[in-house]
Amino acid sequence: MSKDKENLAVSLFSELFVADQLGRSLISKALPKGMEISHFYVLNHLSRSTGEKSPAQLAKTFHVTKGAMTNTLSKLEWAGFIHIRPDWDDARRKQIQISPAGKKAVEHAFAVVVPEISKIVDAIGEDKVRSAIPVLRDLRINLGDGN
C-alpha cells in the first residue's frame, strides 16, 4: 500500500470514528433515562420494519451474539418498549414487536435529534451532504453490512 493511500485510509477512519462518537453522544442525550444507545438502535429498526422479528434475525442484523441480543431485548421488554411472544409455529422461538411506548421513545429521540442534524446539514450544505450519502453507503456495504 502506498503512503498516500495509507494516509487516506487513516484519515477516513479517524473522521468516521470521531463522527460516530459525536453522533452517539447527540443521540444518547435524547434518549429516555436508562435507555442505552444499543436499545435505541433496536427500537429504531423495529419501528421501521414490517412485521415481527425473531431474536436471531435481530442479532444477525446488528452483528451481535444471540445472547447479547436476548439481554438487550429483556431490558427493552422490562421497560415496556417491546412485546415478546412465543412463535406460534415453534414454541422454542420468540417474536418481537415494538410497543406503542417504544414507538413514542423513538419518535421523541428523533424529534430532538433531527433539528440538530438539520443544523449540521445547513452548515455543511445540502448538496455536499447529498453527495456524501452514496459514498457512506458504499463504505457501509464494503465494511460488511450489505443490508
Image (tube, grey):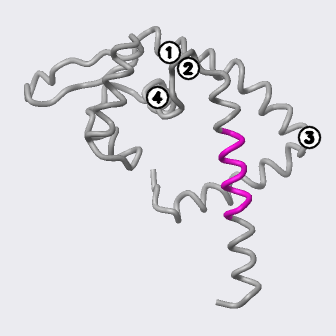
Q: Which residues are magenta?
A: 13-23
Q: Which residue is mark 1?
A: 103
Q: CA distance from mark 2 to mark 4?
A: 10 Å
The residue indicated by pointer 2 is: 106
Q: Is residue 55 left or right of residue 107?
A: left
Which amino acid is tagged 2? Val
The amino acid pointed to by label 1 is Lys
- The answer to whether 84 is drawn above or below residue 134 in the figure is above
What is the secondary structure assignment of the residue under circle 2?
Answer: helix
| Circle 2 Cα neighbour tier, 10 Å, few/some/many (<14 / 14–19 / ≥20) | many
Q: Main secondary structure of the magenta part?
A: helix
Q: Residue furthest front?
A: 34
Q: Is residue 122 magenta?
A: no
Relative to 55, say whether 100 is above or below.
above
Q: Are marks 1 and 3 in contact (CB under 8 Å)?
A: no
- Pinpoint residue 139: horizontal percent, then vertical percent: 60, 62
Looking at the image, which residue is at 26% across and 19% down? 84
Residue type at mark 3? Answer: Ala
Hey, which quadrant is residue 132 in on the image?
bottom right
Q: Find residue 39 and name its label.
A: 4
Structural distance between the alpha carbons of marks 1 and 3: 30 Å
Residue 62 figure quarter: top left
Identify the disc placed on residue 123: 3
Which residue is rendered at x = 77% and y = 85% of the image?
Answer: 4
Separation of residues labelled 3 and 4 (CA atoms): 30 Å
Mark 2 vs 4, N-terminal side: 4
The residue at 39%/18% (across/down) is 98
Q: Earlier in the sequence, mark 3 or mark 4?
A: 4
Could you tell me if the residues under marks 1 and 2 are in contact, i.e. CB atoms within 8 Å? yes
